[in-house]
Image: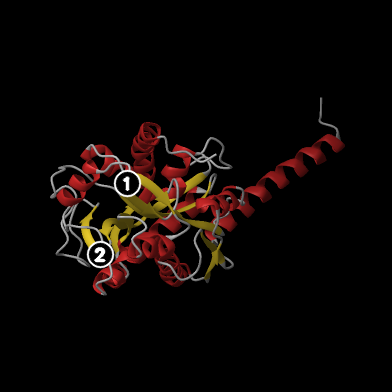
């Protein structure tokens, strides 16, 4: 029995539409990128992360053949920018310069997030590490971690440390220090590095944990004292400052890091193109030097390496948050 003409026509139309959609999708992937790309930076202009984002934007734009435009979307410990990218179309035209705050700290301390660190994003790759440092004011006696620990043990309810916010990487760093050293220090959160370090210089807190980027100018100006860096190795920017591990606590390491992600569901061909471009940009001698100049450390890894780092670090941060009762309502 022959197929009625109308049915044959409808079958032909369906087949043609399916082929057209497939060809369009393939063309879109092969032709990517065909227009400018947005790179959301979840911090305000002017800081190290913003500088990093703009360096990446220039390099990626050159490799991809389209402008990469930085948009600063600060707020809510990177949640605002992350949620925008998580909800964006997975077409490769909206990217996020995420941080460990975005991908491992927020999920450890916030009961309700508008994104999931694994399921909401396509990992493109690791970009850089940023070290943290314990610093003291001139009114605080001593210049070593041993001195600080002794003072904290002698006056646990009067000894305090500043940070640039509850649930931040430096808050976690301070709590990790307390844990390994067996001391108590009162945590005093501020709204940013500037007020935290200003309070330190004014004697309102005895020590502070901050980024090496924010603290180094004040250290070099003689306004605050470096005690120990929280990274696994000493820093080229401050080679004279010992690590916490060298100061009596082997194996200690805590820092913050930055990575490039796209919305979940990104086409594999687009993901591969972005991964290749990021690898080429991040690994040049010029980029490594620029990172060092602003206090960051080269730490490139591909998308798989980024996913593995999140999965390894997240349980540790959740355990630390539970142990130290770090949470954001």
Residue occupying the point 16% across, 65% down: 239
Asked whether the viewer can see residue 303, the reply is no
Q: Secondary structure at mark 2?
A: loop
Q: Which residue is mark 2?
A: 138
Q: Position of residue 17 (x, y in %)?
A: 72, 46
Residue assigned mark 1: 158
* View extreme (top): residue: 1
Please state which of residues 115 and 179 is positioned toward the viewer in this rendering.
179
Image location (x, y in percent) of residue 61: 47, 70
Which numbered dot is residue 127? none
For the N terminus, the image quarter is: top right
Q: Secondary structure at mark 1?
A: loop
Q: Which quarter of the picture shows residue 279?
A: bottom left
**Which one is in front, 86 or 254?**
254
Residue 170 vertical position relative to residue 198 in the rendered view, above or below: above
Quarter of the rendering containing residue 311:
top left
Residue under the point 68% across and 50% down: 20
Q: Residues within 10 Å of mark 2 (few under 14, many from 20)?
A: some
- Residue 247 shows in the view: yes
Which residue is nearer to you in this view: 191 or 155?
155
Query: Residue 101, position in %: x, y?
Result: 43, 49
Q: Quadrant of the C terminus?
A: top right
Residue lying at 39% horizontally and 65% vertically, measured from the top left: 198
């Amino acid at each position: 029995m022959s197929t009625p003409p109308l049915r044959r026509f409808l079958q032909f139309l369906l087949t043609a539409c399916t082929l057209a959609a497939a060809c369009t999708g393939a063309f879109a992937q092969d032709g990517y990128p065909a227009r400018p790309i947005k790179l959301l930076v979840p911090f305000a202009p002017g800081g190290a992360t913003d500088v990093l984002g703009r360096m990446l934007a220039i390099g990626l734009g050159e490799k991809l053949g389209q402008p990469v435009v930085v948009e600063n979307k600060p707020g809510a410990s990177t949640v605002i920018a992350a949620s925008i990218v998580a909800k964006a179309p997975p077409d490769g035209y909206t990217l996020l310069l995420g941080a460990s705050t975005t991908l491992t700290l927020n999920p450890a301390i916030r009961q309700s997030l508008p994104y999931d660190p694994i399921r909401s994003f396509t990992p493109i790759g690791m970009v850089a590490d940023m070290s943290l440092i314990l610093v003291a004011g001139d009114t605080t006696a001593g210049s070593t971690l041993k001195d600080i620990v002794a003072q904290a043990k002698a006056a646990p309810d009067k000894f305090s440390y500043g940070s640039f916010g509850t649930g931040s990487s430096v808050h976690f760093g301070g709590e990790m220090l307390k844990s390994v050293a067996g001391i108590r220090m009162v945590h005093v959160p501020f709204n940013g590095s500037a007020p935290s370090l200003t309070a330190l210089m004014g004697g309102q807190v005895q020590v502070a944990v901050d980024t090496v980027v924010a603290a180094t100018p004040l250290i070099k100006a003689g306004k605050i004292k470096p005690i120990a860096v929280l990274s696994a190795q000493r820093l080229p920017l401050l080679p004279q400052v010992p690590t916490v591990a060298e100061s009596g606590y082997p194996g200690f390491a805590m820092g913050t890091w930055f990575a490039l992600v796209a919305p979940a569901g990104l086409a594999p061909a687009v993901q591969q193109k972005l991964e290749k471009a990021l690898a080429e940009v991040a690994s040049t001698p010029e980029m490594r030097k620029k990172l060092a100049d602003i206090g960051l450390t080269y730490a490139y890894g591909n998308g798989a390496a980024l996913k593995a780092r999140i999965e390894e670090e997240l349980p540790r941060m959740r355990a630390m948050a539970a142990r130290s009762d770090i949470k954001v309502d």
